[in-house]
């Protein structure tokens, strides 16, 4: 299936005088019109309420702006449901949010903001969570939107996809400066996508300016105005490879304390995102859950800032970094070797014990058909054969040889195990090692604890993940590989480059096994480099369109043919359907 898209905008405004109500001034004059430069947004829907957001500022002025908000059943606002007053505060960067209540489950509403001069914002549409009787829900899943790398065509395509909700799994912005040698800036000048400010963001003003730059994008504004978003942050809303007490890309000597930068980044996130802040006294707490009728409970996690310990293996989780070469994985193997029944890795955590207890308790209490985790990082075991992984650091020739030898051994084993040579048997029994230990692979014992706890509940588990910049569908298996506990749908990035940027884009069919001759092009064959991966695309940018029913979950991997032009083609590269009864997958 392919969809040809021209650029679409959902920035329609209504005449400001229509339905405008003069408001009491808070330092502003009724004759001073406000500008709504960054559109409107909604988020964190419940069955009876939703967060509404906007940014309003009088040009060249710095005083607070008084606003009226309206939410109605129709685009003409003749059937008003609720209204009220709110202020875009200078102290909040001229952003404002309101929790609009009095709504009904599973309904679409229209909303807008009006200033005291009668100027209207764009009109947005939003939707509450469905009623208990809902039979189907459709939502889009995004991750990793790097402004300087290209155009947000995925947002544009999703606006007409039929999705009712949007989930963003982190890296909504990136913290890097505009230097040509920084990640993702190669084509920035040519594409007129140079980010602001040009320096790496550290201060309150920096973070606000960066969000404003991203929100100036028409496609992003349009999708925010089209449907409610449910979001979590990852590292780049703070700094690369962040954890609770620091980050790889933070230097206290030149950038101040980590706690100050972390708190500043969290403050601005809550200002600019349509999130219902779970705890106003603790902006670093964003994990929360949503019940989509009896279809699924959505648990949005924070595996990055709230409780993550420092990346223990490699250099901030990277085993290929020159700072840790040669990396032998000795410490990783030691961490997974019990001492008197205790794993040395047990103190290594992606989330706090408090969040883990919150999550498993909520899953245990839920009566929904599916338990879905909105999670930043890849959870599946992405373990490559040691011979293949380690040969990559030697040469392209050595890598190609190791790859061919391993795939051949798997093919021979599938066709005629008795024909295996002793060398091939050795290849099939060799250790498998992770390539990215900033993900859940770097925290294997807490992952095992989480999966086994969920397994004991008997619930149907689906994990949604981002961060990797590539598309994956994988089994979630126990540490020993003997039990399949759930399924992971991991979305590619909206723009950030992936494996293809380092010459590994063609590796996908080898990873998932579809390129193994013995698999005859089928997916989920188990004949790939990574045992748990059923499908991988390591080349394209896009998003996942998820459809959930009581009988199955369908994930459509939607890819853009380019992010380097505003003219693009979107197409479904792969559809994966998981049945509730067995967690079996079918591919189309």
Image (cartoon, rainbow, N blue to C red):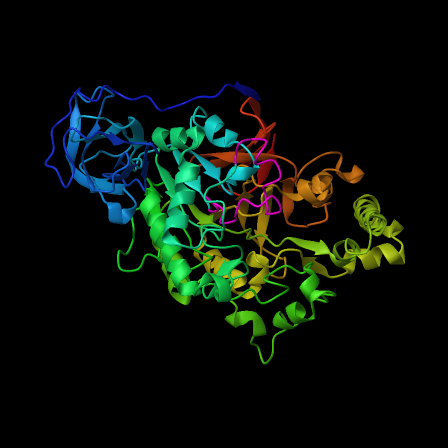
Q: Position of residue 237 (x, y in %)?
A: 45, 50
Q: Residue at x 84, y 46 (%)?
A: 416
Q: Position of residue 332 (x, y in %)?
A: 64, 68
Q: Position of residue 305 (x, y in %)?
A: 44, 59
Relative side of 395 to 484, left or right: right
Q: Residue at x 58, y 67 (%)?
A: 312
Relative side of 180 to 325, left or right: left
Residue at the bottom extreme of this rendering: 340
Q: Main secondary structure of the magenta part?
A: loop
Residues shaded magenta = 170-193
Q: Residue at x 34, y 43 (%)?
A: 272
> Do we see residue 287 in this rendering?
no
Q: Quadrant of the N terminus?
A: top right
Give whichever of 347, 218 is nearer the camera: 218
Q: Residue at x 61, y 71 (%)?
A: 335
Give above or below for 210 relative to 352: above
Q: Position of residue 267 (x, y in %)?
A: 34, 53
Q: Quadrant of residue 95?
A: top left
Residue 173 within the magenta-colored segment of the rendering: yes
Q: Quadrant of residue 57?
A: top left
């Amino acid at each position: 299936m392919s969809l040809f898209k021209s650029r679409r905008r959902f920035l329609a405004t209504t005449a400001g005088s229509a339905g405008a109500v003069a408001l009491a001034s808070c330092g502003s004059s009724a004759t001073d019109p406000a500008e709504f430069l960054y559109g409107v947004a909604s988020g964190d829907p419940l069955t009876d309420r939703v967060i509404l957001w906007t940014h309003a500022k009088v040009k060249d002025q710095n005083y607070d702006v008084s606003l009226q908000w309206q939410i109605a059943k129709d685009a003409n606002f003749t059937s008003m449901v609720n209204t009220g007053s709110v202020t875009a505060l200078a102290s909040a960067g001229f952003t404002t949010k309101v929790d609009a209540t009095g709504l009904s489950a599973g309904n679409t509403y229209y909303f807008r903001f009006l200033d005291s001069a009668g100027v209207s914002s764009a009109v947005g549409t939003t939707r509450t969570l469905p009623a208990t009787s809902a039979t189907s829900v459709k939502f889009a899943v995004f991750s990793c939107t790097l402004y300087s790398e290209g155009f947000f065509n995925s947002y544009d395509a999703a606006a007409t996809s039929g999705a009712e909700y949007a989930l963003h799994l982190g890296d909504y912005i990136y913290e890097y400066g505009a230097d040509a040698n920084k990640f993702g800036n190669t084509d920035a000048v040519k594409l007129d996508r140079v980010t602001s400010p040009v320096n790496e963001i550290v201060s309150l003003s920096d973070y606000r300016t960066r969000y404003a730059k991203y929100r100036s994008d028409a496609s992003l504004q349009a999708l925010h105005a089209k449907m409610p978003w449910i979001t979590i942050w990852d590292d780049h809303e703070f700094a690369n490879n962040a954890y609770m007490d620091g980050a790889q890309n933070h230097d206290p000597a030149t950038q101040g304390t980590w706690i100050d930068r972390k708190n500043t980044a969290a403050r601005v996130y809550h200002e600019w995102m349509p999130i219902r802040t779970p705890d106003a006294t603790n902006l670093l707490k964003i994990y929360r859950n949503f019940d989509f009728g009896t279809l699924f409970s959505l648990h949005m996690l924070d595996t990055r800032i709230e409780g993550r310990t420092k990346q223990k293996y490699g250099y901030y989780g990277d085993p290929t970094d020159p700072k840790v070469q040669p990396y032998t994985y000795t410490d990783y193997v030691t961490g997974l070797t019990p001492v008197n029944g205790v794993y040395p890795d047990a103190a290594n955590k992606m989330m706090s014990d408090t969040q883990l207890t919150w999550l498993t308790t909520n899953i245990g209490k839920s009566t929904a058909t599916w338990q879905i985790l909105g999670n930043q990082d890849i959870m599946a075991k992405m373990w490559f054969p040691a011979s293949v992984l380690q040969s990559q650091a030697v040469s392209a020739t050595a890598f190609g040889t190791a790859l061919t030898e391993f795939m051949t051994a798997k093919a021979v084993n599938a066709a005629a195990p008795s024909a295996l040579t002793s060398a091939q048997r050795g290849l099939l029994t060799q250790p498998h090692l992770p390539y990215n230990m900033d993900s859940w692979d770097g925290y294997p014992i807490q992952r095992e604890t989480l999966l086994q706890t969920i397994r004991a509940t008997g619930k149907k588990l689906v994990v949604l993940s981002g961060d990797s910049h590539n598309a994956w569908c994988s089994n979630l298996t126990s540490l020993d590989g003997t039990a399949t506990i759930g399924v992971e749908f991991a979305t590619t990035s909206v723009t950030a480059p992936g494996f293809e940027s380092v010459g590994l884009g063609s590796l996908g069919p080898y990873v998932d096994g579809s390129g193994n001759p013995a698999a005859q092009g089928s997916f989920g064959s188990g004949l790939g480099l990574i045992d748990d991966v059923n499908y991988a695309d390591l080349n394209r940018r896009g998003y996942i369109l998820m459809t959930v029913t009581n009988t199955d979950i369908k994930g459509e991997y939607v890819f853009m043919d380019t992010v380097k032009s505003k003219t693009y083609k979107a197409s479904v590269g792969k559809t994966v359907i998981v049945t509730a009864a067995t967690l079996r997958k079918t591919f189309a």
